[in-house]
Amino acid sequence: MKQSYLQSILLFAWILCISAPVLSQVGINTSTPRKMLEVNGDVQISGSIDVAMDPLKEGQASTFLIQDTDDSLKSLDVSNPTGAALGYIQEYVITNPNLDWVRDFDTGIDASEFVLITISAYFDEELVISTSANAIDNASLPYTATFIKNGTWHIIADYPMVANLDVNAIGTWTIKTLIFSKDLSKQFGTVNIPMGDGTTGSAVTPIIQ
């Protein structure tokens, strides 16, 4: 029985081999193949498969294939600014905050679907050390961060311990962010590090070897 089944498989493969040059296109479970070989149904491959592709030429766009949430495959054309991409860069221009302080800016980006980080930020007004206690001994660097609130990503921006030299000036924050889908990144759990009142520490087990 096994030998007869194997002979049938070999015969089918032989028919494909001799038919392909004549028919140009071969279909399995379809009578109207759209390519050289089209399989209408599930395919299981045991072992390796080699894919030979011509290198991209100048002016040609590169694309990526990813698996969507419904297990289908979709193409990502990174050269198309309006299509889906591996990552997105979004610049926010926030004008006229309270002095230099943006306490909570809601981007509206779904935190369950995307990750958002700030990659650069600057404020366009001249600043001065504030009059709060001991402020004269301090310097300040811009502080920006993202956090999740009510299911969306929010941004905070501030120059700690300083404020606008001209309190009536209308300042502007320019904050550039990187957004990418959680489907394209691996999410690790939280790592708790007890420092024991010390200043140095190390991970018990590296998250990536």
Image: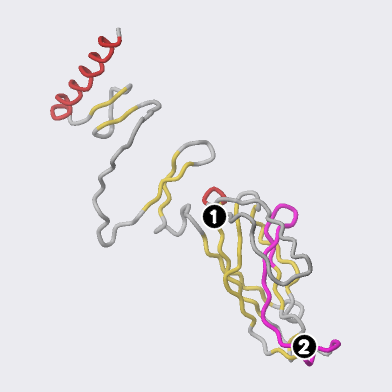
Callout in the foreground (2, 1): 1
Would residue 141 be counted in the magenta stretch? yes
Q: Which residue is mark 2?
A: 167
- 124 vs 17, left or right, is right
Q: What percent of the width, then of the height, locates residue 207?
A: 58, 54
Q: Secondary structure at mark 1?
A: loop
- 91 vs 40, left or right, is right
Q: Amino acid at mark 1?
A: Ile
User: Which quarter of the figure has residue 159?
Assistant: bottom right
User: Which label was assigned to residue 98?
Assistant: none
Above or below for 191 versus 117: above
CA distance separating discs 2 and 1: 48 Å
User: Which label was assigned to residue 208?
Assistant: 1
For the N terminus, the quadrant is top left
Q: What percent of the width, then of the height, locates residue 154?
A: 69, 62
Determine crowd level at label 1: few under 14, some 14-19, many 20+ residues with C-alpha closer than 10 A: few
Q: Amino acid at mark 2?
A: Val
- 190 vs 31, left or right, is right
Q: What percent of the width, then of the height, locates residue 85?
A: 47, 54
* Residue at 52% across, 60% down: 88
Above or below for 207 versus 8: below
Q: Secondary structure at mark 2?
A: loop
* Residue at 53% across, 36% down: 70
Q: What percent of the width, then of the height, locates residue 115?
A: 60, 56
Would residue 152 be counted in the magenta stretch? yes
Above or below for 155 versus 14: below
Residues drawn in magenta: 132-155
Q: Earlier in the sequence, mark 2 or mark 1?
A: 2
Q: Nearer the viewer, residue 191 or 40?
A: 191
* Residue at 50% across, 36% down: 71
